[in-house]
Image (cartoon, helix red, strand yellow):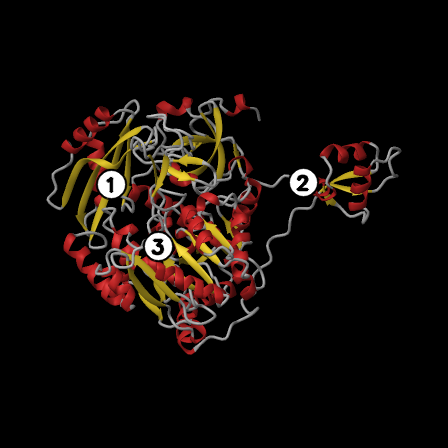
Amino acid sequence: MDHFSRNRPASSSTTRVVDVLVPVAIDQAYSYRVPRGMEVSPGDVVTVPLGPREVIAVVWAENPSPDSRLHNRLKDIGEKLGVPPLKNELRALIDWVANYTLSSRGMVMRMSLRMGEHLGPERARAGVRLSGEPPQRMTPARRRLIAVLSDRLLHGKSDAAKEAGVSAGVVDGLIDEGTLTVEPMPPPPPPPPPDPDFAVPDFSRIQRAAVDAMRALAANGTFHVALLDGVTGSGKTEVYFEAVAETIRRGRQALILMPEIALTGQFRDRFAARFGERPLEWHSELTPRTRARNWAAIAAGEAQVVVGARSALFLPYADLGLIIVDEEHDQAYKQDEGTHYHARDMAVVRAHIAKIPIVLASATPSVESEVNARKGRYQRIALTSRFGGQHMPQIELIDLRREAPPRGRFVSPRLAGEIQNAIERREQALLFLNRRGYAPLTLCRACGHRFACTICDAWLVDHRFRQRLVCHHCGFSMPRPRQCPHCAAEESLVAVGPGVERLQEEAAALFPDARTMVLSSDLITSIETMRTELNDIAEGRVDIIIGTQLVAKGHHFPRLNLVGVVDADLGLSNGDPRAAERTFQLLNQVIGRTGREQGRGIGYLQTHQPEHPVMKALVASDREAFYASEIEARERAGYPPFGRLASLIISAGDRPTAEGFARQLAATAPIDERVQVLGPAEAPLAVIKGRYRFRLLAKSARGVDLSGYLREWLAAGPKTRGNLKLEVDVDPQSFL
């Protein structure tokens, strides 16, 4: 049927109309006619015309009484795709997330259909087989290709060319001469199912109780939230694997969310050691074809276990039976672009809608999860000691007011001496500094000129390895100049403060014979490079690791016994209400990488604030005292989880426009004694990517429908026009 005929008017008595949600920034569904002979139901994935293009969309609901005035203007559905429909539970989640976050349903639904043109049945790949006579003209390239295909089996065309080290033209030439024949490759087999009984570990007595709780949780199969609260190195992963094993036995799917895709490689190896097969991956680094193949396996129920980043939460699972959120405290679970959602919280919502259990795992639970466990909303499953009888790391403070490093250096003499001792014992050491690049600021010693981003309100970070000055907020970069652009002084630029690259330079000077490696997100070219570097560390080919927060996220370094935190105060002075919590979690996690297999680990915290409650709690290993004081402070201030926050960020190409709109918006806020509206105020990062930013903060009690309040406010308030932009962030994690 051609496009014209599909869009012809039809009789209202015989035409069926459905509402279709399209993946664009709109909240309502559009009405489309169902062509005669086509059967569609809510959840079916279809193509529909949208303006001049055709898009992949989802049938959302029946429309039994369409507006008769629009009947002749309605367009037909293009085709129904041969993929499983989106189940009721996923569509309910999309509606819930859109309503809660004030996002358009179309953009939330789009996260479930990230395949684009690759969605649908997989196209057959071309394969080649050696079958005819040798060619009349033989070349070295042809000879290599024929050698690869000498088994006369079917090989993928591109795979054969790659293995032989020849171009596609060489393959095509032998096809033309009849030496090779072309046949379609069979579709790849579905992933083999993990075996829940492949290698069941021997659990300790303490672990056994947690394992029993995990199995019972999965076997029960109803909505239930468990907080797996275990110290670093206690074997949390192996424990929650037993919940996964029970889910597999029951023929259902399990989703394991991880905060960073870099973690999935090491994790998949651990999974394979337990279950005999690797789980399916889902993250942004997959090729479009692999993503499409994995999406289809998940939707068809062929993939029993999926490990992925936050977006994996919105996939169309055939029969989801369990959700695990590993490192549930991690800030990376918050999506700060497009739809502003927190994957941990939305995972709990999905589990509630689907009526399935969910496990939140962490050595340093978020304050929100800790409060829920204390109030009995979540079941706490505790692992209080390390696996195999290993001791928890010892933590010592180095007061920089009394033990300052030499001028121009950042590692104190005591820490340098301890690292030297560790190297001599053939142990690994980690220098931790949560600051990328060489230095956070570059200035001219002649005139004092500071290098700032041209389109952001931020200093340019010196990246000495790349010889560039970089903005970490917008990505702007420039070559590191030889002279000051302000006063033209030659060789006058000086780096101020340390970054991990500068720390490596210092480590090379202090320990010239040691093998060093920097682990930082901006130096990683691919996920495979990251996995190779982590493997080098695990196998002892590195003496000193120098890393940012990337190293704190669940990695297992068996030879690591010492951590030196170069600037333990770094996260405490940024005005973030969660600053103390995040510093405690980060330092606890990074020191927790030590002493997991050999000897007792030790962590040194270089600080100017040894009397700070966070430092005292870390040294005393008094987690309870920290949480008690932090919970009390939150409750007193009415901050989450005892209250609710929503951030409204207004941005424009010039400051007066942004400020003027922010003031107009603030003036129209509905009067509600339960809601306090703060601002507008200039954002701490006042300019990003050339856009001037102002913030409003809405604060309410926990029981208030803050999303409803915001919806009423925005409906009555001024509307954005031109280059004005308004972003709403319910439950913000960043206050920049």
Query: Residue 61: which quarter of the image?
Result: top left
Amino acid type, residue under disc 1 in the picture: Ser
Residue highlighted by disc 1: 647
Reply above or below: 386 against 173: below
Whether residue 589 appears in this view of the structure is no
Q: Position of residue 76 (x, y in %)?
A: 48, 28
Position of 426 with respect to 498 (left or right) is: right
Residue highlighted by disc 2: 125
Residue highlighted by disc 3: 566
Reply above or below: 229 against 492: below
Q: Position of residue 434 (x, y in %)?
A: 36, 50
Q: Nearer the viewer, residue 371 or 587?
A: 587
The reply to whether dot 3 and dot 2 touch (C-beta < 8 Å) is no
Q: Nearer the viewer, residue 112 or 400?
A: 400
Of marks 1 and 2, which one's residue comes earlier in the chain? 2
Badge 1: few (under 14), some or many (20 or more) residues near its Cα, within 10 Å? many
Question: Marks 1/2: CA distance?
Answer: 49 Å
